[in-house]
Image (cartoon, rainbow, N blue to C red):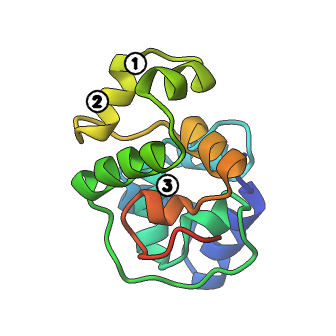
Amino acid sequence: MFNANRIKSIRIESGNTQTETAKFLNVSRSSYGMWENGSEIIPIKRLIDFCELYKVRVDYILELTNNKKRTRNKFNIDIAGLRLKEFRTNFSLTQSDLANYLNTVKTVICGYEKGRYLIATPFLYSICTKYQISADYLLGRIKSSKL
């Protein structure tokens, strides 16, 4: 779902240690290490923080593109909710349709769209791969939905 080697290489290229990166992300070094070795999925909030720290695309980390295309735009939960709703509407999906596809409940989709909480990393990845849409776009970090 995400490329642990990309996370590691970006950190190493920057000259930071796992401890320094973990501190910035407000997690333990061991938690960060598990993301870097691929034994755990990085939560979306921490993935966004990582990408903002190193100015890389979420799409790059999720292997949706090979283009790092550094971005300076910050994540915005309200825009992310609106973009998810826009995506769903553009593909003629109801909240129930999307919930069924993601194996969750409609209230979760509603919560994402209203900006109550962040979309789960596996859900974001599933949507982006199936519908060929940019994760950075859905998260409000770039203007184009194309990968």
Q: Is residue 63 above or below residue 87?
A: below
Badge 3 crowding class, 10 Å Cα cut-off, few under 14, some 14 to 19, many 20 or more, is many
Q: In which quarter of the image is the C terminus?
A: bottom right
Frontmost residue, 53 versus 79: 79
Q: Residue at x 49, y 65 (%)?
A: 136
> Label for residue 19?
none
Amino acid type at mark 3: Leu
* Front tag of 1 and 2: 1
Amino acid type at mark 2: Gly
Q: Is mark 3 on a helix, strand or loop?
A: helix
Amino acid type at mark 1: Lys
Residue 75 position by quadrant: bottom left
* Front tag of 3 and 2: 2
Are discs 3 and 2 less than 8 Å apart at CB? no
Which residue position holds label 1? 106
Mark 3 or mark 2, which has the lower sequence index? 3
Which residue position holds label 3? 47
- 141 on left or right of 21: left
**CA–CA distance in space, label 1 to label 2:** 9 Å
Q: Quadrant of the N terminus?
A: top right
Q: Position of residue 77 (x, y in %)?
A: 27, 52
Which residue position holds label 2? 111
Q: Residue at x 53, y 24 (%)?
A: 97
Badge 1 crowding class, 10 Å Cα cut-off, few under 14, some 14 to 19, many 20 or more, is some
Residue 76 position by quadrant: bottom left
Q: In this view, does 82 lie above or below 142?
A: above
**CA–CA distance in space, label 3 to label 2:** 20 Å
Mark 1 or mark 2, which has the lower sequence index? 1
Are discs 1 and 3 less than 8 Å apart at CB? no
Q: Position of residue 146 (x, y in %)?
A: 60, 71
Q: What element carries label 1?
A: helix
Q: Is residue 10 above or below residue 7?
A: below
